[in-house]
Image (spheres, rainbow, N blue to C red):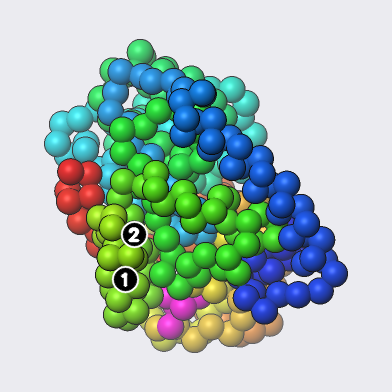
Amino acid sequence: MNIKTEISKIHYDKQAKGLFFSLLKFFSIFYGVGSGFKNLLYDNKILKPKKVDAFVISIGNLTTGGVGKTPVVASLAEYFSSKGEKVAIVSRGYGGKLKGVNVISDGENVFFDAKICGDEPNWLAKNTKAVVITSSVRYEGAKLAVEKYGVTKIILDDGFQHRKFYRDLDIVLVDSEKVFGNENLLPAGPLREGTEAFKRVDKLVVVSKNINHSRAEKFARVMGKKLKIDTFLCKTEPAFSYNIKDENDKASVGNKIVAFSAIGQPKQFYKFLENYEITKTVDFDDHHIYTQEDINNLEKICEEQCAEFLITTEKDAVKIKDFDFNKKIYALKLKTDLDVEGLVK
């Protein structure tokens, strides 16, 4: 595991302590000053965000990684597409190799694989009818979407802290299990900014990645009442697992499996696999770029564990589909239950 992964563990340890944690807290002071100063400039209209001629919805969060934005972004994109809107998703393209402004999909054709454009943009391109664009400068990506494709709705993926670009609706997601971790600012904790940022939030979505949603439902009610913000519950549950080489081949439950992933919160993914007998889990760093050697090692582990097959996430599946493997590898399909119409009103 690299240093980033080790720091991520600290972020969600409320008992974190020690010299290294103290050092991280020291640097958090400078991060907080910088973040606060930037927000002060925008809040007082000293700096002004750029606009495009389209309705812009930002989907973001206060913490780093693993909240569950991608399925929510996809749900919104499909909702607007079903209403006849021309939709674009603009992403930073984290984990990809592309620079500048890039059209990943025109709504029909996907032009880059996950290794090049990043796992999330690639998954969104394959699972929605939206134009998908990556750009570190979100305004430039949105501008291209409007001028070239005539989009009327733009969904800004992970855009809450990107205040250079104007949005008409700010939707923020909170993980019902992880919440705000150890409640420290980066790099000591997962917070990208302090909870005072809630004053900029238009709608709040509590994401429940669980089988039992009672805790999340209670948390959503408490947050909505406390913050006086319209709050929605997004239920994310396992649907089925499909063979990444043949999507018609569905995995049978109850088998011995090896599960692996390269995501921000792997433990929540493994909880979804309770209908299988997990013999071993293998964690890679978030947004890990797989190699053929990784696949060979996973197959070796599968044999050693006497497992029937391997299961991973859909985000990981798009990155390994073209590799050679002898063991069957399945991807877990998730289903999302969210009142999208109420959310975007």
First in sequence: mark 1 or mark 2?
1
Q: Can residue 99 be seen in this view?
A: yes
Circle 1: element type: helix
**Farthest residue, direction front:** 44
Say which mark, if any, is on residue 206.
none
- Residue 216: within the magenta? no
Count the marks. Answer: 2
Tell me if 281 is positioned left or right of 3 in this view.
left
The C terminus - image quarter: top left
Nearer the observer, 139 or 335: 139
**Boundaries of the magenta span:** 270-274
Q: Position of residue 27 (x, y in %)?
A: 76, 52
Say whether residue 85 is left or right of residue 257: left
- Up-down relation of residue 53 to residue 85 (above or below): above
How packed mark 1 is, by other alpha carbons closer than 10 Å (few <14, some 14-19, many 20 or more), is: few
Q: Is mark 2 on a helix, strand or loop?
A: helix
Q: Where is residue 21 in the image (x, y as percent from the top left)?
A: 77, 67
**Which of these two is toward me, 31 or 75?**
31
Magenta span: helix, strand or loop, mainly? loop
Q: The disc labelled 2 sits on which kind of residue?
A: Leu
> Which amino acid, mark 1?
Val
Residue for badge 1:
222
> Where's residue 122, x and y in %?
47, 41
Residue at 34 percent of width and 51 percent of height: 72
Q: Name the residue under label 2.
A: 227
| Horizontal relation, residue 314 to residue 96: left or right | left
Location of residue 126 by image quarter:
top left
